[in-house]
Amino acid sequence: MNGSFEVSDDQLLQFYHLNSLNPSTSWESDSTLVYQLEDVQWEQDNLETSYAVLNDLLQQEHEFNRTKGFNTNSEKEDIRDPLNPSVSAMELLGSLPIDPTSGKSYEYLISSKSFKPKLYLRKAHTQDTFEQLTKSLDVLDRSLQEQSYELKQLIQTNFAKYVRSKSNLDNIYNRFDTLMNSTEAQTYDEDELSVQRLNEKLNETMKQTSLKLQPLLSNNEKLQKFQSAILFVNENRYFFDLPKLLKNLLLNKDYSNLMFEYERAKATHASLSARHNGNSNINNENSVIEKIWNEVELIMDKYRKYSWAKLLMPPAIGTSDSQEVFLPLLSKLIDLKVTENPIIMWIDTRMENFQEQLQRVSSQMIENIVRSAESLLENSSGNDVDLHFYLSMNLYSDDSGTKNESSLTSAQNHTLMVQRSLTDAPAVVETWLLTLKFMTELNNISASFVEFWEHVERFLDNTYQTMLLNERRQNKIIEANDELSTDDEDMLRFTEEEVQILKKQGSYFIQSIFKILINFFRSTQENIGIKNIPSSKDSGTPSSYGFIPPRSNCLSCLRYLPKIVAPIFRFTTELAQLAIDTESIETLRKLDAFIMDRCVSAISSTRLRDLSLMYILEDWEVFDSFDGDRYSITQFPEISRSLQQYSIQTLHEILFFYEKLPVIKGISVIGYPSKQLLTGIEIQQIVSMESVLESVLKNAAKDKDNPRNSHTVLTLNNLNHIKSRSFPEVLHHFDDAFEMNLSSKNLELYNLLAKMESSIFGNYLSDLKFSLRDKLEDKFHDINWSAYTSNSFRVSDYIIETLMVLISIHSECFRIGPQLIEKILKETQVFIAKYLFEAFKPYVGNVSSDGLLQVTVDLCFFEKVLKGLLVDDTRTILIACLQNCFQNDVPRMQRIIKETEPIVNSNLDRTEIQFASLK
């Protein structure tokens, strides 16, 4: 045997990976390697498939060493990180969250078949920057060049050994072939020692050697491709840096530059896609360009969602949308190529928000109002309203100089003064305030809707679209691209169908307002809070009006109803002047007319009730005196007058509220009140004045059994004041407010008042006459006129006590009703004279001489005491009485009168102080 081919048995076993040099079965089963070399890859012996076959063989070898446990870790230690040769494979695997001894570790080794480049870059070099990766690729390039050079040197140095080995293998093959063809070959088992099998093994070994050499020999081609890749990355570094750039701009909220870079990125992507069109390695879904662009779109999708959320987010309470905010957002969303129309979405979202606000506010506030009303009824006793607040109400006065300034005020300052104190019980006021808050909330919602609809109108007339298009065209010109996307323009333009849908949405909002308010103002105190209340006939009682709290007095109605309806009239006018459609305008007109009618009826109803009950407030204290007319009154006439004038002022404020509202586009929802409405108010005014008289009559009825007292005098004074001042002033105020002539009409009201005054005064006189009659009968019949004798001739007691009754009447009336004294004394003196005339008739011709003297003294004294107040009828009756007593002997009567004159004068002097008030 040739000496150069001499090797030991161990070397042969290790080289050929055999268990023994004398296999008992076959070479394959005795082999220690399990290589799958019969793959179809061998059928294509070319450069493109050789590298894959080489990797497969290397992987099988690694798997074999790993399963056998041969130098696993030492093998990994020999492998270096291709992008960082200073780090070994073991150090690299130690920095990763995996077990270096596990099978997954081969996914990070470049020499392994299971090596995954993406996983390797994502996990092992996730923190590397673009500059670091570029430097690492340069290192890898140099390393490949060095290995290529070393491989060439290795092949050149060992080429002779390779040829010699090949020659030796050929000799071995020839020897085996000779042996197998010799006669001795029959002694061998063909399955055990087959030259053909050995030839196959040798061929496989040669192929393995060729496969290992081919990748290294084709390294120059791969190096050129790698350099091309680096050149492509360097040329398009901006595109590769886009995800990081856009993410930083998004995090820093630099949205203007974000959009600028995104527009620039779209142009760059389009250019790259066009340049590499047809190259499947770049344009497929897994290409680097598409992956980078997908990352860009993911980042911009976050900005899309943010822009959508910001656009559709409802404005804060008390604020409205600003075109400086939503127009740029709309433009950005269009630039971001959203699928849905952002303008339509913004309008729809706002409309839904307004509807939600309406339903939420109405349900919450009505629930609170109902709960407050129920609490008011539960915590109150009885069904009567609290009228005591009228006692502290500031009163109207046209003649403030004659009034107490601390309690009275002029008409022009009345409203201001009324606001300084409560007008009703706190629980009632609380319910009023809830209703006022309800209307304020509706006003705020409507005001926001009006501002919002003004923006919608600018979209409908293309004002905003023109602004957006001009801005976008300007931006396109700056970017050297004067072409504007047709889709962008279509998204900014509304179709006729979309316009009609938007107007229907606006009309639906107005219908919702109408339903809420019509239901609220149509309700009664029994069914308030129920939805869809049907219309019913108005009973005219305060309980028919659910929008006023239970047990609310008219004073609180006059304070709060104008505050409640004022925002309604304002925002309904503003809604109508949006001119969404004709139906909406007519709906709002009907609504305001209905609310106005209900409020007027509520005020009239509560006023009528309170005036009819106001007699309970009468305390019979003198409230004011009028020196010119010489009488005093209680507070009742002024309270009733003030309430009526305040109600007239409030009704005027409600009915003529249109004067405070502008007329825009020729549209107004409230105007001059109708004749029917004014006629109704006129009738209610007369009824309320009759109610004042009814209240007076109720108080007078309390003293009908004992009418001769100060209450009756004050009642007569009040009626006189009502007739001469209160009613004329109220009617004048009414005529001025509503431009009518009610004060000039011949009202039956004054006839009723005169009858009441006459009846009460007659009842007073009747009681007084009964008292005088009793006095006269008691004392007059104590004298025996037929046998009467006297030496002193003092005035008789029946005359003195009768005059004392008149003195008491004078005293009662002098302080509170001096104008009644003369009238009362005239009536009573005639009554006294007539009574005496009839009383002396039975004694005619039967009166003693002293009796005639006494009669003359009594009647002359009575006449002279009442000298200043004596009426002709009284004098005539007294003279007739004397003539009867003297049996028509006039000369004798005249003589006796003259003779008794000193006696009369003496009695006058003696009683001068006693009867001084009658002079």
Image: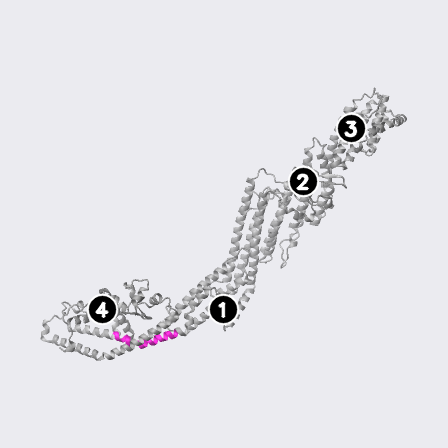
Quarter occupied by residue 74: bottom left
Label 1 crowd (10 A; few <14 / some 14-19 / many >=20): few
Q: Does the magenta stretch include residue 224?
A: yes
Distance in Å between CA atoms under marks 3 and 4: 157 Å
Who comes first in sequence, dot 1 or dot 3?
1
Kind of residue at disc 1: Thr
Kind of residue at disc 2: Ser
Q: In this view, does 647 lie to the left or right of 78?
A: right
Residue stretch in magenta: 211-232
The residue that mark 4 highlights is 35
User: Which color scheme does this rendered protein use?
Assistant: one colour
- Mark 3 secondary-structure assignment: helix
Distance in Å between CA atoms under marks 2 and 3: 40 Å
Residue 633 or 435: which is nearer the viewer?
633
Q: Is residue 676 above or below residue 469?
A: above
The residue that mark 3 highlights is 802
Kind of residue at disc 3: Thr
Who comes first in sequence, dot 2 or dot 3?
2
Distance in Å between CA atoms under marks 1 and 3: 115 Å
- Identify the main secondary structure in magenta: helix
